[in-house]
Image (cartoon, rainbow, N blue to C red):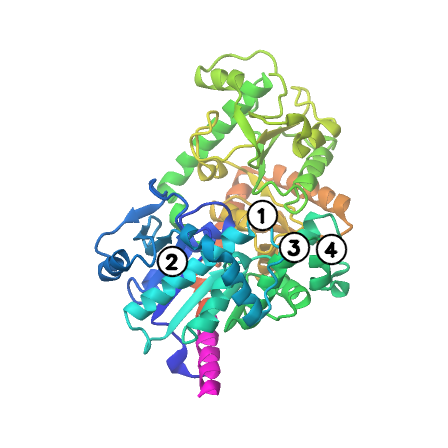
Amino acid sequence: MNKALEKPEYLFESSWEVCNKVGGIYTVLSTRARTWQNTYPTDKTVFIGPDVWKREKAPDFLDDEILFREWRNHLAATRQLKVRVGRWNVPGKPPVILVDYTPFLSRRDKFFYDMWDSFRVDSIHAYGDYDESCIFAYAAAKVIESFYNFYQLNDKKVVALFNEWMLGMAVLYLRKYLPTVATMFTTHATSVGRSIAGNNKPLYYNIESYSGDQMAKELNIEAKHSLEKQAARYADCFTTVSDITAAECEQLLDKVPDVVTPNGFEPDFVPDDGLYKCKRENARTVLLRVAEKLLGHTINTNAILLSTSGRYEYRNKGIDVFIEAMDCLRNSERLTRDVIAFIMVPAWVRDARADLKYAVQNDYDVKAPLQMPFCTHWLNYMEQDKILNFIIQKGFTNSEQERLKIIFVPCYLTGSDGIFNTSYYDLLVGMDATIYPSYYEPWGYTPLESIAFGVPTITTDLAGFGLWAKKEGVGDHISQGARVIHRDDYNYFDVAEQISQAVMTLCAEKKDGLAAVRERCFHLASLAQWSKFIVYYQSAYSVALQNAQKRLDLKK
């Protein structure tokens, strides 16, 4: 290995989710920002995101008038790009450039033809968010090109990392127009794999027989798949986040990832020892108070509190299995403790329900269950909601006589939802266990966040995190901090039953035993911090730089 190429001198990273919290990639990038700032030259790790706010204040963005001032003045004078330059308001406060991509929409047809002519990217079948995503990628590449040329970085080792198919066009643009920049492309989930799973097709049993191109045509995602496939092919280093997704890439994209770069976290958001007990007590107080007002009866303070959370991907996230498992638990004669199971999954909320809001805010003594005692917020089209329909279909009543109650919390828990008015993390710390029975989960931040807060978690070996935990020698028993259940295309009911048994085991733990479980959670989480996982990225940067150099040498 050429040691001179191991470490980039400038690092650009772009994603649709930079300063734009719409999914899990926001967590990936924002949590590792400080580690990158501490590892690479100061202010030479630059994030690039979309300026979707225009003249409005962008959340998590701090303007910095000094940062890259000369370049910004140059852009203002030449009117080449419309950008905002500042810092991302996350630990480490790295430089961030937000670019307004909308002026480039008029160049769409010419640009798409260029990508077809040079790389055979098929955009003819594009629809939905394809155009906007690809034009942002084009704008992000233009930002790097302008910055590179203005600061004359020709003699510097520069790496540009692009996340997901939405940024694939940036990989290809730099490959053609700025080939001295080493490019990386990371897929967090293949578009074809996610679509197969989301359309209730058996992904794993048949994966060796699937053709990515054929399935993309069948599922009407040819444009996204074509772009993703070509970006993986032409990037100097292609990465993904877990071994399970690496196998998916090999089969569906016809490309073996060069490096697997698992997702870590920073412990900044976890309360320290002095605050932990207080935070946990406060969380349980809030959760139990809302549950009591909704259900119309007192709940034992010793009740076991469970939850699942994440995006509303009913099958992929295993929400259906969670409800099935709670039904198994509810009907078990061995269940001797009260259990409250929360489904914290954002849906299309109409409003916080007024009756519950009044009861919670005024500490009103509710003597009977409220109407629809399964849901904390009113939804648009409640009669069509899969979660509520399955809860009712399984026969849950949430009556005082039943040991287990299930509650759907369909809102973003940001601290201003109208009912809990408490952030997700400040509620997570009050749980006794979390359950994520994923069917399709390239990594899985939610179980990792759970153990970071000392809350044991149950997940599956179809989640990247679950496979990682198994490699670390845990996962066979909930007392280890993480229980990893085998899941495949056809063992739905077996998974539900195993979840039920694992929760039953936890219910039987004494106070000292639960404290020991929390300590094992903290230990396991410490192994997944970015300070440990940065080595995978260092390897990927080195691969990108070396492959770029080989590519340039061949042209000489």
Q: Nearer the viewer, mark 1 or mark 2?
A: 1
Please name the amino acid that badge 3 sits on: Ile
For label 1, the SS is loop
Give the labeled residue for mark 2.
Answer: 47
Q: Nearer the viewer, mark 4 or mark 2?
A: 4
Give the labeled residue for mark 1.
Answer: 128
Gap in angstroms between the C-alphas marked 3 and 2: 28 Å
Q: Nearer the viewer, mark 3 or mark 2?
A: 3
Give the labeled residue for mark 3.
Answer: 221
Please name the amino acid that badge 4 sits on: Glu
Rendering coords of residue 128 (x, y %): 58, 48
At 66% from the left and 31% from the top, the residue drawn is 385
Q: Circles 3 and 1: CB distance less than 8 Å?
A: no
Q: Main secondary structure of the magenta part?
A: helix
In-front residue for pair 528/298:
528
In-front residue for pair 175/239:
175
Residue 218's disc number: 4
Gap in angstroms between the C-alphas marked 4 and 3: 8 Å
For disc 4, the neighbor class at 10 Å (few under 14, some 14 to 19, many from 20) is: few
For disc 1, the neighbor class at 10 Å (few under 14, some 14 to 19, many from 20) is: few
In the rendered structure, which disc, 1 or 2, sits on the residue that comes first in sequence?
2
In the rendered structure, which disc, 4 or 1, sits on the residue that comes first in sequence?
1
Please name the amino acid that badge 1 sits on: Gly
At 58% from the left and 33% from the top, the residue drawn is 304
What span is colored magenta in the figure? 539-556
Gap in angstroms between the C-alphas marked 4 and 2: 36 Å
Q: Circles 4 and 1: CB distance less than 8 Å?
A: no
At 77% from the left and 58% from the top, the residue drawn is 205
For label 3, the SS is loop
Q: In which quarter of the view is residue 462 placed? A: bottom right
Rendering coords of residue 318 (x, y %): 66, 44
